[in-house]
């Protein structure tokens, strides 16, 4: 292996999947230089497994979905290497970012590397609506850092001793390729929240929370500058808040 690939030879990319056949090949193509790609699949039935088995650097594991945080921590535990790059099944590492990763000196476990994510809505970058400036901790040493145990909206937790480093090059996130994905995501996330909910709000509070989610996205986060895409994101955020809370409310009223 060449010198430029030294860091990549120490890295395991880690992905959790379920029915990702539409996007996973593009993701795995961008990870071919990684020594290992760990796939933890949670019951795909759409051809995802057949696709990932075609990549020689993929280590495929199957198991139940434990919530996003616990599932990602379990997937990380399956890797051969302690240095882990967490990536979603609809994300891609461009060549410039791969070169930057390959040249890293991974000699200090307390380092944690943040990547700026360019979010694409039907192949067009969204710069506002809460989708711009999306810095995420994605490269870390698993003996020092781990994901939170949140069922939804998990993240890698840092510590006082963490040396936080921002990488220069961004990764691509094919967040939305069809508007219907918003509806599927709202339903999936609200179901997870309902199953783990501890508090129910009165109906007027639920409505206010949904209205606030729209206002925050469309006005405060300047979603109006993203055209019709910003409007869709704002309405989706409002619906997400509404259905998350109304499902909890309805379950407790039965």
Image (cartoon, rainbow, N blue to C red):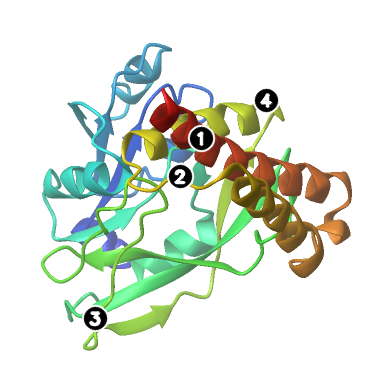
Q: Position of residue 192 (x, y in %)?
A: 38, 35
Q: Can the viewer see residue 128?
A: no
SS category of the residue bearing label 4: helix
Viewer-nearest of discs 2 and 3: 3
Viewer-proximal residue, 11 or 243? 243
Give the spatial CA distance, label 2 vs label 4.
Answer: 26 Å
SS category of the residue bearing label 3: loop
- Between discs 2 and 4, the one toward the N terminus: 2
Tag shown at residue 180: 4
Residue receiving disc 1 = 26
Viewer-nearest of discs 1 and 4: 4
Q: Position of residue 55 (x, y in %)?
A: 31, 29
Question: Quick check: marks 2 and 1 in contact, CB under 8 Å?
Answer: yes
Query: Which residue is at a point 63% across and 53% down the rendered structure image?
Result: 209
Q: Is residue 112 left or right of residue 153?
A: left
Viewer-proximal residue, 175 or 26? 175
Viewer-nearest of discs 2 and 4: 4
- Callout 1: 10 Å neighbours few (<14), some, many (20+)? some
- Between discs 4 and 3, the one toward the N terminus: 3
SS category of the residue bearing label 2: loop
SS category of the residue bearing label 1: helix
Q: Is residue 161 left or right of residue 203?
A: left
Q: Is residue 142 above or below residue 214?
A: below
Viewer-nearest of discs 1 and 3: 3
Count of marks overlaid on the render: 4
Residue receiving disc 3 = 159
Question: Quick check: marks 2 and 3 in contact, CB under 8 Å?
Answer: no
Give the spatial CA distance, label 2 vs label 1.
Answer: 7 Å
Query: Which residue is at a point 42% across and 52% down the rendered structure image?
Result: 153
- Callout 4: 10 Å neighbours few (<14), some, many (20+)? few
Give the spatial CA distance, label 1 vs label 3.
Answer: 33 Å
């Amino acid at each position: 292996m060449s010198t430029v690939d030294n860091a990549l030879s120490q890295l395991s990319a880690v992905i959790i999947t379920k029915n990702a056949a539409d996007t996973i090949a593009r993701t795995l193509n961008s990870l071919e230089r990684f020594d290992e790609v760990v796939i933890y699949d949670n019951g795909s039935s759409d051809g995802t497994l057949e696709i990932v088995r075609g990549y020689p650097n993929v280590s495929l594991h199957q198991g139940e979905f434990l919530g996003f945080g616990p599932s990602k921590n379990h997937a990380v535990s399956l890797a051969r290497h302690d240095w882990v790059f967490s990536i979603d099944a609809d994300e891609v590492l461009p060549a410039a970012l791969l070169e930057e990763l390959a040249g890293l000196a991974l000699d200090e476990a307390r380092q944690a590397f943040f990547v700026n994510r360019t979010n694409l809505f039907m192949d067009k970058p969204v710069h506002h609506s809460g989708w711009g400036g999306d810095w995420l901790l994605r490269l870390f040493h698993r003996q020092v850092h781990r994901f939170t145990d949140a069922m939804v909206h998990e993240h890698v937790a840092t510590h006082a001793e963490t040396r936080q480093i921002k990488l220069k090059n961004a990764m691509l996130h094919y967040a939305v390729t069809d508007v219907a994905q918003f509806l599927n995501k709202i339903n999936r996330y609200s179901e997870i929240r309902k199953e783990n909910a501890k508090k129910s709000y009165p109906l007027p509070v639920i409505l206010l929370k949904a209205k606030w989610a729209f206002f925050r996205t469309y006005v405060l986060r300047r979603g109006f500058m993203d055209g019709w895409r910003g409007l869709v994101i704002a309405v989706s955020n409002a619906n997400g808040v509404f259905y998350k809370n109304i499902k909890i409310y309805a379950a407790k009223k039965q």
